[in-house]
Image: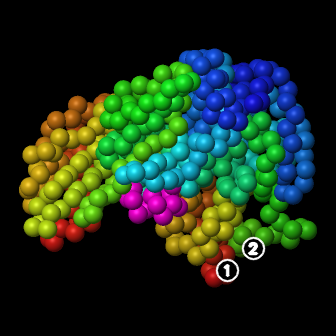
Amino acid sequence: MKPAPFEYCRADTLDEALDLVAEFGSDAAVLAGGMSLGPMLNMRLARPAAIVDVNSVADLSGIRLVGDAVETGALCRQADALDSALVGDDVPLLARALPFVGHFQTRNRGTLGGSVCHADPSAEIPLALATLGGDVVLRRKGGMRAVAAHDFFKGIFTSVREPDEIVTALRWPRSEPKTGHAFDEIAQRHGDFAIGAAAAVATVAPDGSLAAVSLGLGGIEDRPVLADLSGFVGAPATARTASEAAALAAGRVDPMVDPRASAAYRRQLVRVLGARVLERAFERAGARQC
Amino acid sequence: MLRIEPGARHRVTVTVNGRLYSGFAEARTLLSDFLRHELKLFGTHVGCEHGVCGACTVNIDGRAVRSCLLFAVQADGAEIGTVEGLATDGVLSPLQEAFRRRHALQCGFCTPGILISATQFLETNPDPTEDEVREMLSGHICRCTGYEGIVRAILDVAGDAS
Ligand code: FES
Ligand code: FES
């Protein structure tokens, strides 16, 4: 349970970090909080030639408002995001998802960007980002791009990040008025990996109908997926609509099978968790009766 | 920029419980092993070495974190708090005293990590509900006590402080 030898490189600036990932390419692992990379190194599931530690890069920290989005530096600690009034007010879905991420002690160190880079299909932060239609900001030497979260995740532990790129920030669209958010998951133990997770965002019009609705699902397929609920725009924001929408989503997913759960169980989770989070989001958006 | 070749020994200087310590670590040396094997501070325990059990939890720059998921070289210059620093002149801290009173430990393997977590938790959340205490404790595994005494001990101190 000790890591194999590696070269340790501590970058003090973003330019140094970009030089290092350009030098080592896929032989390097970028170390942020280390809550996922640490166990993989200790168990020797990962044996990179070099570790590029970015914890001293000041440019990667912070939470700020940039136009219509809240931008969180890739190194923003999960505990700091959870404590942030800006996140609580403007990105309530993230604030509702974070208590499910690991534990108090791992959120103290674990980062938002690290969780996104790790691309665990059951992780809560990628699911929240994808459900909100947020972006992942990547930098390489002499270049920068923003990728929609929806296109960023490619499969289990796989993303479109190239070996010479570093994720520098996440952009979270700010919450709209009359919009409710909800997050829930089923795991074997609190703080453990979700077997299935669901995130909902709904905007309710003054007449009680749905002006917009999104349902994101984590731990079900090999990456966070969004259910297509466009057919429910205009439907009444009621418990009945919530369960019909979740049933539609459950019929369309292609669930993973692993020792913890069968495909049928995961499909049932979509039905149950999906209806639950949609209904809660409707209520929080101010729907009169559910 | 700092670069440490594989296998090279690097000097690491840290403040532990207010005292300056210095030792050598390879890049891959876990902070938990550095504390125990190099600094001979055996109060911090090691269970799973992948962040799950919480036995290795120490306070770094004000936050309870897993020392098995940090490399010693990352902690160079840091202020570290371990269980050895909780008592003052042989007098147990109020939380330690509550653990003793409530039988919150049996074998004591999990205890150093839980004490460090609970101490920081109570600093940031001095009057927690039982649910909040249990949520914080979900980051620790105790095979002996069934957690009941631990929850009571933490709530005792929270009650006293408020
Ligand atoms: S030894 Fe660090 S969490 Fe178990
Ligand atoms: S007292 Fe034995 S593991 Fe907790």
Residue A169 is situated, as x and y percent measured from the top left of the image, at: 49, 41
Asked if residue A118 shows in the view, the reply is no
> At 49% from the left edge and 48% from the top edge, which residue is drawn?
A72
Of helix, strand and loop, which one carries label 2? helix
| Mark 1 or mark 2: whose residue is earlier in sequence | 2
Question: Which mark is on residue B94?
Answer: 2
Of helix, strand and loop, which one carries label 1? helix
Residue B148 is situated, as x and y percent measured from the top left of the image, at: 57, 66
A186 to A120, vertically: above or below: below
Q: Quadrant of the C terminus of chain A?
A: bottom left
Residue A110 is situated, as x and y percent measured from the top left of the image, at: 57, 45
Front of the two marks 1 and 2: 1
B48 to A207, vertically: above or below: above
Q: Please, which chain is the residue tagged with disc 2 on?
A: B
| Residue nearer the viewer, A224 or A15 | A15
Q: Which residues are magenta?
A: A81-93
Please check the rendered image and state whether residue A210 is part of the magenta-colored stretch, yes or no. Answer: no
- Mark 2 is on which residue type? Pro
| Residue nearer the viewer, B27 or A214 | A214
Q: CA distance from mark 1 to mark 2?
A: 10 Å
> At 60% from the left edge and 26% from the top edge, which residue is drawn?
A18
> At 76% from the left edge and 42% from the top edge, which residue is drawn?
B75
Q: Which residue is mark 1?
A: B161
- Mark 1 is on which residue type? Ala
